[in-house]
Image: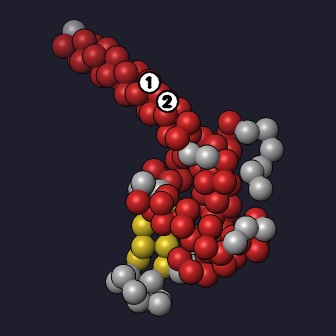
């Protein structure tokens, strides 16, 4: 009986946490503009294939998205500040790379599932 009640309570808590996650995702998506969503998703695709420094990723995304390097880099830094990216290595080290955090990967999956076509 105790185990059964514990499982029921656990299930209720998981449903509650899932609802919080869904609502938080909606809030995050609402705050990101289309350019930031595009940068986030396209960066995710590039970073799955190869590791890049912030500058190299900015360069690659600028070419792919037909946007100025400075716009891409500024948005990547803003997305990093929001917790979607993290750097591996010391700040200023040219060999340090950038990668999506678990939060970034989750938001990319939410964006990809919310849009009928890939974001370009």
Viewer-closest of 73 and 28: 73
Cα–Cα span, label 2 and label 1: 5 Å
Measured as percent of width and height from the top left, residue 69 is found at 65, 75
User: On the rendered structure, is 120 left or right of 78?
Assistant: right
Sort mark 2 into few (<14), some (14-19) or many (20+) by Cα contacts within 10 Å: few
Q: Do residues under tags 2 and 1 come within 8 Å of each other at their CB atoms?
A: yes
Query: In the image, residue 98 lies at what x, y percent?
Result: 49, 73
Depth check: give the residue in front, 115 or 18: 115
Across and down, in percent, residue 102 comes to 45, 54
Using the rendered image of the protein, determine whether residue 89 is visible from the camera's viewpoint.
yes
Image position, residue 112 (x, y; %)? 68, 45
In which quarter of the view is residue 2 placed? top left
Location of the N terminus by quadrant is top left
Residue identified by numbered label 1: 19
Q: Which structural element holds mark 1?
A: helix
Which one is nearer the viewer's eye here, 47 or 71? 71
Which quadrant would residue 42 be assigned to in this image?
bottom right
Asked if 106 appears above or below 115 in the picture, the reply is below
Give the residue at x 41% y 77%: 88
Residue at x 34%, y 17% (from the top left corner) = 12
Label 1 neighbourhood size at 10 Å, few (<14), some (14-19), many (20+)? few
The residue that mark 2 highlights is: 22
């Amino acid at each position: 009986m105790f185990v059964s009640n514990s499982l029921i309570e656990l299930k209720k808590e998981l449903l509650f946490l899932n609802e919080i996650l869904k609502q938080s995702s909606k809030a995050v998506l609402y705050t990101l503009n289309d350019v930031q969503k595009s940068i986030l998703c396209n960066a995710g695709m590039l970073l799955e294939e190869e590791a890049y420094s912030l500058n190299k990723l900015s360069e690659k995304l600028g070419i792919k998205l037909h946007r100025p390097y400075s716009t891409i880099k500024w948005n990547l830094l803003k997305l990093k500040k929001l917790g979607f990216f993290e750097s591996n290595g010391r700040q200023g080290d040219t060999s340090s790379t950038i990668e999506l955090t678990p939060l970034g990967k989750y938001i990319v999956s939410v964006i990809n599932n919310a849009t009928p076509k890939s974001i370009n």
